[in-house]
Amino acid sequence: MMASLLQCPTSPFPPSFSSINRRSPVLRFHFPFRHAVRCNLVDPIKFDNGKPYAPLLNTSPLHLSSTATSHLENTLPPFNKYDTRLRIFSGTANPALSHEIACYMGLELGKIKIKRFADGEIYVQLQESVRGCDVFLVQPTCPPANENLMELLIMIDACRRASAKTITAVIPYFGYARADRKTQGRESIAAKLVANLITEAGANRVLACDLHSGQSIGYFDIPVDHVYGQPVILDYLASKTICSDELVVVSPDVGGVARARAFAKKLSDAPLAIVDKRRHGHNVAEVMNLIGDVKGKVAVMVDDMIDTAGTITKGAALLHQEGAREVYACSTHAVFSPPAIERLSSGLFQEVIITNTIPVSEQNYFPQLTVLSVANLLGETIWRVHDDCSGGIEPYSSLGID
């Protein structure tokens, strides 16, 4: 059974809700699990089924003395979502995720008009004032990548010309991230070009989720908050009743070893296996060998994205040949270019676990698919950026912020 996208209730925040405790109500979302499951963790993940947990000071008036409550009321202005200097706008790429983020934060999405002229040109107009505001634009550059990227650039330009104080591009999926280096002569480094475009358009900051490679952060001349979606998947896997002795984490290629090792450390320091492959062209991979033991074990393949699913399905076939009992595929970004759905639903995988950084259309649903939400993770990060708070300590930390 596939977990559906989250349904957000109406904001629970009363008009008099103070800015010090605006995040204390915790929205609870539950994903239907295919199995009753439990995995031991060396360092337990502080999440609840895809929902980030951030320790907050208990400053609710119910737990404060009358003197302290009076002091807070006199020194802190009441929180009003209509008066806040924080604004969140959504592009057309993933409005469902944008709505969930706003719902977690107790805000409403800003009013924005986006349309396309007959010749395909994009028109953007903000329909509310953002003068002096911290503006966050939620727009993954997922397929169609060029359309969504151009829309993001025009949204940034509209906010800059409307005198926004700061503009943060929230990019759950950063397109062109795979073109991050030159592997052959006369190639472009499109990741650097896109970083320059976003910066020159007027963005002051970028919030990205699971970039394809760490060096992409250095392509930006503005601050980048790099959020990892893996803790959401880790928390889901931690609910499974897989014995830690039977678990092995598999990297589908040598380049993903660091990601898989960090993932394995959180899952009871599980052993690691590596699929050695030879790539003969873009979106074409040939599996050559397996490094590690998977016989009789539950293999969890970890990657940052699934595009055509060629790499991960060939790796899964190799794992079954080597005696793996079950194979799980875990990925943050579900690009799902054809023929990914046919490959993933062929029976090689016990479950394919993804997040909603990229919207999945209904025609791409299949029985083994499970979709987890990163809305609360991104929402909490937005609050911390807005409040000038620290996002995290290290990559793959408990909150998942680099």
Image (cartoon, rainbow, N blue to C red):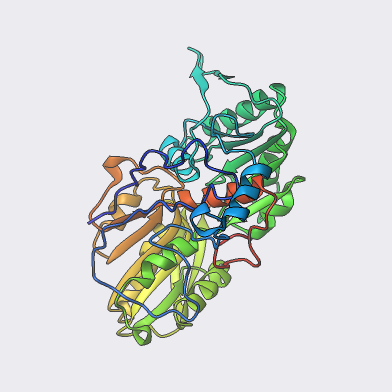
Q: Nearer the viewer, residue 258 or 238?
A: 238
State whether residue 66 is above or below residue 265: above
> Residue 8 at x, y = what percent?
37, 43
Q: Judge whether residue 290 can be spotted in this image.
A: yes
> Residue 23 at x, y = what percent?
52, 50
> Residue 175 at x, y = what percent?
56, 44
> Residue 100 at x, y = what percent?
43, 42
Quadrant placement of the N terminus: bottom left
Q: Residue at x 57, y 44 (%)?
A: 18
Extreme residue in the right direction: 221
State whether residue 107 is above or below residue 209: above
Quadrant in which residue 361 is drawn: top left
Q: Residue at x 74, y 33 (%)?
A: 200
Quadrant placement of the C terminus: bottom right
Q: Nearer the viewer, residue 341 or 382?
A: 382
Left of 293 or right of it: where is 389? right
Q: Nearer the viewer, residue 266 or 176?
A: 266
Q: Judge whether residue 178 can be spotted in this image.
A: no
Extreme residue in the front direction: 66
State whether residue 205 is above or below residue 319: above
Q: Nearer the viewer, residue 142 or 81?
A: 81
Q: Residue at x 69, y 57 (%)?
A: 215
Please state the total of marks drawn on the protein image: 0
Extreme residue in the top direction: 118
Left of 367 or right of it: where is 257? right
